[in-house]
């Protein structure tokens, strides 16, 4: 890469020298006739060749850097050094989501940051949607087969990951899709042909003025005609090109991704269905989008300070706007389908990379029917493997609720997050952090990180009961609810808490839900006595030895027998 960088510098310097020489030839040819006018073409041709070669060197360097980054990030994920690197995805967290914040789906060190290898916003959005929407058993199985196939195609995943490594998702797919379906803004294509006449006249008049002494009047007359045309079409042209230039780099990546996918042949039904979306009659999508990308690059070139005067003479912006409009009429309606297919490929490749890097994590078994979450060796995928303590857990028709008690810092909240994040992975089509997991399609509802709001004027307790009501609402949906409630109703007195918590839990169970709650209030642990065997108590313990507290984070049956609150207070110097 160092040799390539030096060559880049030499070529870049050569471009500048050739440009200056070309300017000198033009000047001398015009002022003194020292060079024939035809000589002007020589530096122009050489400059163009240097530009093409320079772009090739840049792309080669970026691809090499992207490959290094791809493997470096893969090793970081395998070695649990990934947190803080990559896209956090916070912009994709839906307002009103009932578990994303509670389960750390987005943000620094989040599940999204661990999984995502997408390069387009369409890919990131599709992955984020999968993490927030449980899929049916049939869809999950279809994704699992596709992920398994893609996990063995390392070359394909590397190619997709390194394409456009320097660009991160600048285009909103919905904006591009809407643009592709906009009504025609510019006049008939015949008008475009008519506009060429004053351009030819102005260019010819300028050449005649410089080379044969025609004088300035024809040239400025041509400029006046062009100015009138540009002014008449100004609003329409602006409406057509508004926002398009911002999409240039993203569309360039999209064309490269499409070109790579078009060369691949897949076996499973899920991938062949996506492949069929890209199999269009005539020119393939990659070539069509690459053509649009070239038009956008040409449009952007008008901002070059050296080219800007010539662009004005050529009515450059107007002609490019007509060309983009012509492209949009033909290919615009298909853009949304292409973006959807690429987004799904990238989301599947993100899950396939996780599968490849964590081969011990199995695919879960999704069984339609009664609510079920049966796990062996369940661990949290965001906790480094060396520190991850695994537990067995089974929620089904017999045991629908676990009431988790235990001392502070013993692992109660982490257990809720572990169950929730593995359910999210499972119903997105990804492998899970467990030796074995069997579950039914479930809607997750969590109350773990609910906080008060000064802006909304609501207390923590009011925010919590609002969340509980929202979870009850989704419990009436097509999937049974998996509820995860941390320190349920701890913002009120013990009497009201016991009555309210029992009513809420009975309501969830009556709606066919399963779940876990945690509590420090051992009075709540007695709720299990009135649940006809549908609820069980489990707990975590701690060991306080030589003034130091320790935890093994292992689930044990029954209610916790001791508390460590006073010991913790004394350990940091509080007199109690």
Image (spheres, rainbow, N blue to C red):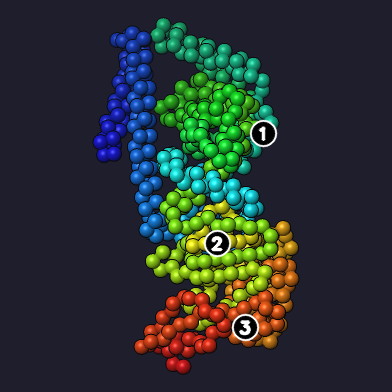
Q: Is residue 501 left or right of 142 when viewed as pictured?
A: right
Q: Residue 459's mark?
A: none
Which residue is found at the position 30% from the left and 33% from the top? 8
> How many numbered marks, from 0 up?
3
Q: Is residue 467 left or right of 159 when viewed as pictured?
A: right
For disc 3, the neighbor class at 10 Å (few under 14, some 14 to 19, many from 20) is many
Q: Residue 182's mark?
A: 1
Q: CA distance from mark 1 to mark 3?
A: 60 Å
Kind of element beneath mark 1: loop
Name the image quarter holding the N terminus.
top left
Which residue is found at the position 55% from the left and 49% from the top? 144
Kind of element beneath mark 3: helix
Q: CA distance from mark 2 to mark 1?
A: 47 Å
**Residue denoted by label 3:** 525
Asked whether residue 232 is in view, the answer is: yes
> In the picture shown, does residue 419 fall above or below 35?
below
Kind of element beneath mark 2: strand
Q: Quadrant of residue 39?
A: top left
Give x and y (percent) for residue 366.
Answer: 61, 57
For disc 2, the neighbor class at 10 Å (few under 14, some 14 to 19, many from 20) is many
**Residue denoted by label 2:** 437
Give x and y (percent) for residue 187.
Answer: 66, 23
| Disc 2 versus disc 3: nearer the observer | 2
Q: CA distance from mark 2 to mark 3?
A: 27 Å
Which residue is found at the position 65% from the left and 77% from the top? 535
Whether label 2 touches label 3, CB < 8 Å: no
Q: Earlier in the sequence, mark 1 or mark 3?
A: 1
> In the picture shown, does residue 66 fall above or below 390?
above
Give x and y (percent) for residue 444.
Answer: 63, 63
């Amino acid at each position: 890469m160092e040799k390539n960088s030096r060559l880049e510098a030499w070529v870049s310097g050569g471009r500048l020298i050739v440009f200056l020489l070309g300017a000198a030839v033009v000047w001398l040819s015009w002022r003194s006739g020292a060079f024939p006018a035809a000589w002007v073409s020589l530096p122009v041709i050489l400059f163009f060749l240097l530009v093409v070669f320079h772009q090739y060197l840049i792309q080669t360097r970026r691809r090499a850097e992207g490959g290094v980054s791809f493997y470096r990030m893969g090793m970081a994920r395998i070695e649990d050094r990934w947190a803080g690197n990559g896209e956090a995805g916070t912009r994709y967290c839906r307002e009103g989501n009932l578990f994303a914040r509670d389960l750390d789906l987005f943000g620094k060190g989040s599940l999204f940051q661990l999984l995502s290898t997408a390069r387009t916003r369409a890919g990131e959005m599709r992955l984020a949607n999968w993490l927030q929407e449980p899929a049916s058993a049939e869809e999950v199985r279809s994704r699992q087969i596709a992920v398994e196939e893609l996990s063995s195609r390392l070359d394909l995943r590397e190619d997709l990951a390194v394409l456009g490594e320097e660009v991160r998702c600048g285009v909103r797919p919905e904006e591009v899709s809407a643009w592709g379906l906009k009504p025609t803004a510019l006049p008939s294509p015949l008008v475009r042909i008519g506009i060429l006449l004053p351009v030819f006249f102005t260019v010819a008049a300028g050449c005649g003025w410089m080379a044969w002494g025609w004088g300035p009047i024809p040239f400025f007359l041509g400029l006046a005609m062009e100015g009138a045309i540009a002014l008449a079409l100004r609003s329409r042209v602006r409406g057509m090109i508004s926002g398009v230039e911002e999409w240039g780099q993203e569309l360039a990546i999209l064309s490269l991704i499409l070109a790579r996918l078009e060369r691949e042949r897949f076996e499973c039904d899920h991938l062949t269905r996506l492949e069929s979306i890209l199999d269009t009659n005539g020119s393939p999508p990659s070539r069509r989008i690459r053509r649009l990308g070239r038009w956008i690059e040409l449009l952007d070139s008008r901002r070059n300070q050296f080219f800007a005067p010539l662009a004005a003479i050529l009515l450059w912006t107007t002609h490019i706007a007509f060309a983009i409009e012509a492209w949009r009429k033909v290919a615009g309606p298909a853009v949304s389908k292409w973006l959807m297919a690429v987004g799904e490929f990238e989301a599947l490749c993100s899950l396939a990379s996780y599968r490849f890097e964590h081969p011990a994590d199995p695919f879960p078994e999704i069984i339609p029917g009664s609510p079920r979450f049966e796990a062996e060796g369940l661990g949290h995928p965001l906790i480094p493997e060396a520190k991850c303590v695994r537990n067995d857990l089974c929620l089904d028709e017999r045991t629908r609720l676990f009431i988790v008690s235990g001392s502070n810092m013993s692992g109660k909240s982490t257990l809720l997050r572990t169950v929730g994040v593995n359910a999210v992975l499972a119903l997105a089509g990804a492998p899970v952090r467990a030796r074995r997991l069997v579950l039914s399609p479930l809607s997750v509802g969590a109350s773990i990180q609910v906080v008060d709001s000064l802006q909304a004027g609501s207390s923590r307790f009011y925010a919590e009961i609002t969340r509980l009501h929202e979870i009850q609402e989704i419990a009436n949906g097509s999937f049974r609810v998996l509820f995860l409630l941390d320190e349920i109703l701890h913002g009120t007195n013990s009497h009201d808490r016991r009555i309210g918590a029992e009513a809420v839990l009975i309501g969830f169970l009556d709606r066919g839900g399963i779940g876990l709650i945690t509590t420090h209030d051992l009075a709540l642990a007695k709720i299990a006595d009135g649940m006809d065997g549908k609820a069980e108590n489990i707990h975590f313990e701690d060991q306080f030895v030589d003034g130091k507290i320790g935890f093994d984070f292992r689930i044990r049956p029954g209610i916790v027998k001791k508390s460590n609150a006073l010991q913790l207070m004394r350990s940091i110097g509080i007199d109690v």
